[in-house]
Image: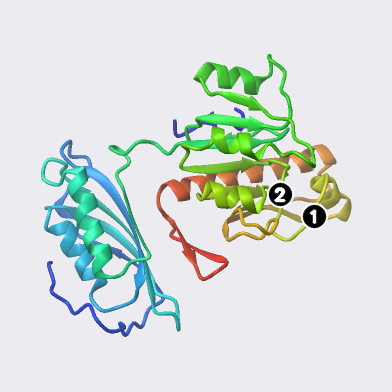
Amino acid sequence: MNFLHRVISPSSSSQVFGFAKRSFKTIQIPFGSIAYSTTSSSLVHGIHQFHCPDVVGILAKLSECIASRDGNILTADIFVPDHNHVFYSRSEFVFDPAKWPREQMDADFSKLAKMFNAMRSVVRVPDIDPKYKIAVLASKQDGRLPIHITSVISNHERGPNTHVIRFLERHGIPYYHLPTTKENKREGEILEIVRDTDFLVLARYMQVLSGDFLRSYKKDIINIHHGLLPSFKGSNPSKQAFDAGVKLIGATSHFVSEELDAGPIIEQMVERVSHRDNLRTFIQKSEDVEKRCLAKAIKSYCELRILPYEESKTVVFRS
């Protein structure tokens, strides 16, 4: 298996003004899923992500919105930070598309977003909505991703008979080889290729994207870093860590920002190593934890589990 393999090919009229007096920071609420079975052929699974100023009645109105269309909330994850009057939620629900058409759903949640002056309101129905279109920017290393890939861009050439190229050809995924230099990073060409994507993934792409690129693209970019930031920057980081005799290695998935490896963190994983590891097994463990960390970050992103929090953090609702 390689890095480019696809493994996912009560109504209420509660007051909505004034800050809510909450005694919790994070809660997960299971709703009445007994009344509905997600195995029913007529019911479809939906996800709603919400971020707005914290006022009284938000959860009640969310429930009312879904229940009014004969839908049923299965779970609701809620986070309200201390001393910061904002409300974050992620809800999973089931509904009958015949009773709640997809276009009407967008209109209903849009009305709710306006009611609460939401900074973010996103709804996704995985069985109905198109898959996310993504492009992968990679350098030399291989690995795996849990999502359909529409294009791969690399600044290193791969031979015609490598397993990566064979995989891309087998699945009809375009491959672009764009050699870069310090003077020309081919960012204009990359922007043209990724113009219609929903987000980008940097799979060990050993080039720093400029601020101009980030501002032009305007969408999220997820990167994988070979350690628990900050650590062992520069060339051959695994060899640096091995020579330093570390006992824990790790990986960090984060959003790309203008500052190198300083974007909001999405996911971190660790793996124990010991004196029994040689450089080969050390690198193998390091690469494996990177693949798992990146896959988890992408899965969380596609399931609407990630929300921006303050300037440099993220809220990540777990399954």
Asked if labels 2 and 1 touch by Cβ distance under 8 angstroms, the answer is yes
Give the residue displayed 21% in from the left and 53% down from the top.
107
* Image quarter of the C terminus: bottom left
Count neighbours of disc 2 (C-alpha within 10 A) and say few if under 14, some if 14 to 19, many if 20 or more: many
Q: Residue 226 carries which label?
A: 2
Tell me residue 206's x, y (percent): 73, 42
Tell me residue 263's x, y (percent): 61, 59
Tag count: 2
Relative placement, left or right, of 169 versus 71 is right
Q: Which of marks 1 and 2 is nearer the N terminus?
A: 2
Relative placement, left or right, of 280 versus 32 is right
Alpha-carbon span between mark 1 and mark 2: 8 Å
Label 2: which secondary element? loop
Give the residue displayed 64% in from the left and 48% down from the top.
224
Looking at the rendering, which quadrant does residue 19 occupy? Answer: bottom left
Relative placement, left or right, of 91 versus 246 is left
Residue type at mark 1: give it: Phe
Visible residue check, residue 145: no
Label 1: which secondary element? loop
Query: What residue sits right under mark 1 in the picture?
Result: 232
